[in-house]
Amino acid sequence: MKGSYVLVIEVLDDLEIEVGRLGRIDFGKGFYMYVGSAMNNLEKRIRRHLREEKKRFWHIDYLLEHAEIKEVVCFESEKKQECVLAEYLKESFDSIKGFGCSDCSCKSHLFFSDNIEEISATLLKARHNI
C-alpha cells in the first residue's frame, strides 16, 4: 500500500526534549498528530514507528521515545498527499515549527490538541476531503 498517514500520539506529561538539529523543544501534555508518507510500503513504515527499539532517524523518533502512539490513520493514495494533509490540519491545530518537514516547504508536520474528540472528527473529515 502507498500513501500518507497520521500518527495520533499522547504525551502524558510536559516534556522538553532534544530533537536532532531542531534543538530543545517543549511538548505540552496532550495529543499530537504527526503526518508522514510512505510511497513504497506504508505498512512497513507504520510498523517501524510502532517498534520501541529503533535508531533515531526522523524527528518523530525523538518524540516517540517519550510518548505513545494511540492511533494510526492511513490515507491510501498513489500520489504523495503528506503536505496536503499537513496543510489541512494546520487550519485547525497549533503546530511545532519545523518538525517533520525538513524535506518540504511546510511549516510543520506535527500538530497539537488537548481534545481527542476534535482530532478524531477532523481526521474523519480529512478522509472525505483529501
Image (tube, grey):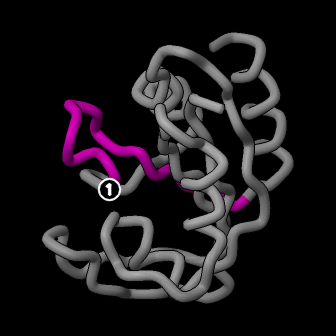
- Locate residue 10, reporting x and y percent: 68, 72
Q: Say what amino acid the circle numbered 1 marks.
A: Phe
**On screen, 65 above or below 96?**
below
**On screen, 28 above or below 47?**
below
**In percent of the image, x 47 and y 87: which residue is there?**
15
**In percent of the image, x 81 and y 29: which residue is there?**
124
Q: Residue furthest left?
A: 21
**On screen, 92 above or below 113?**
above
- In the depicted view, which residue is nearer to us: 21 or 118? 21
- Dividing the picture into quadrants, the one containing residue 118 is top right
Horizontally, is 90 left or right of 68 in the view?
A: left
- Locate residue 45, reporting x and y percent: 55, 54
Q: Which residue is mark 1?
A: 99
Most common secondary structure along the magenta stretch: loop
Give the SS element for disc 1.
loop
- In the depicted view, which residue is nearer to us: 44 or 124? 44
Mark 1, residues whose alpha carbon is within 10 Å: few (<14), some, or many (≥20)? many
- Locate residue 62, reporting x and y percent: 39, 78
Tell whether position 112 is magenta.
Answer: yes
Name the image quarter holding the C terminus. Answer: top right
Horizontally, is 71 left or right of 64 in the view?
A: right
**In percent of the image, x 74 and y 42: which residue is there?**
73
Horizontally, is 130 left or right of 85 in the view?
A: right
- Dividing the picture into quadrants, the one containing residue 78 is top right
- In the depicted view, which residue is nearer to us: 127 or 76? 76
How many tags in the picture? 1
Horizontally, is 127 left or right of 16 in the view?
A: right
Tell whether position 104 is magenta.
Answer: yes
Name the image quarter holding the N terminus. Answer: top right
Q: Which residues are magenta?
A: 100-114
